[in-house]
Amino acid sequence: MSFREKSAWIMLIMIVLMTSLWTAHMPWWRPFTLAPDPNPIVFHALILATVGFVVIVVVAHIVIAVLAPRDASARADERERLIGLKATRIGAYVYAGLSLSSIFIIHLGANEIGLAYFLLYSFAIAEAVNYAARVVYYRRGVGP
Amino acid sequence: MTQTTITNSIRRLRFERNEMTQQDLAERVGVTRQTINAIELGKYSPSLEVAFRIAVVFGVRLEDVFFYDAGNAR
């Protein structure tokens, strides 16, 4: 498994894990409502999740780079660049679709906080899809 | 699995060249070992430039390395 494939796995697992943990810190009803309260505990959980995410991702990348230093320092070749481009495109479609659908969320009665949560989840979902697509392309192969 | 309509004889050519490893070939071509493996398994069709570089490493013509299967072309 190449350094970049391992990196994609790390990002996918961490995005899913951190989003899930942060969601779990909310009162049980918050993820299911469109207008959550501006609770400082939820905000602190978001900050902790973000800082924890960055720290764990950096440490994990240092570990896999130490285990395969030559692989880690090599430039991405044409296949890896193609996989990156294709997966990013899929993630961008997801993000665009979810972001545009935020208009409907407002019409359903969400306030600005609900909208902010929705956009944040949209970003997390889009990035998860992006890295999941990379993993699939690395495993199954990538066509033109 | 994503399969291309282009097949190749890289594995045989490696074997005939003193069992050259995928890593050796990858370093000489300038791609990762995983990319050489993906090309061998038909999971990835390389660019024309990389295809030529592979042929140059083996000292053969491009058409001795890669074969286009027109019957399976979409």
Image: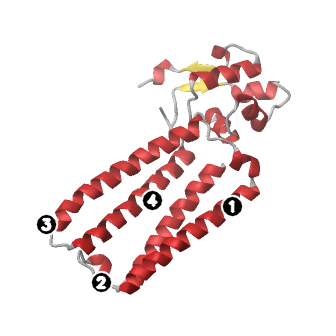
- Within 10 angstroms of label 2, few (less than 14), some, or many (20 or more) residues? few
Q: Do tag 3 and tag 4 residues touch (Cβ < 8 Å)?
A: no
Image position, residue A38 (x, y; %): 30, 82
Q: Which residue is mark 2?
A: A29
**What is the distance, in whole Å, between disc 1 and disc 3 at their CAs?**
45 Å
**What is the distance, in whole Å, between disc 3 and disc 4 at their CAs?**
27 Å
**What is the distance, in whole Å, between disc 3 and disc 2 at their CAs?**
20 Å
Q: Do tag 2 and tag 4 residues touch (Cβ < 8 Å)?
A: no
- Within 10 angstroms of label 3, few (less than 14), some, or many (20 or more) residues? few
Image position, residue A125 (x, y; %): 39, 61
Numbered circles on residues, count: 4
**What is the distance, in whole Å, between disc 4 and disc 1 at their CAs?**
21 Å
Q: Which residue is mark 1?
A: A62
Chain at numbered mark 4 = A
Instruction: Name the amino acid, label 3.
Output: His
| Dot 4: element | helix
Instruction: Name the amino acid, label 4.
Output: Ala
What label sits on residue A128 in the rendered view? 4
Closer to viewer: mark 4 or mark 1:
1
Instruction: Name the amino acid, label 1.
Output: Ile
From the viewer's side, name the closer residue of B2 and A23: A23
What label sits on residue A107 in the rendered view? 3
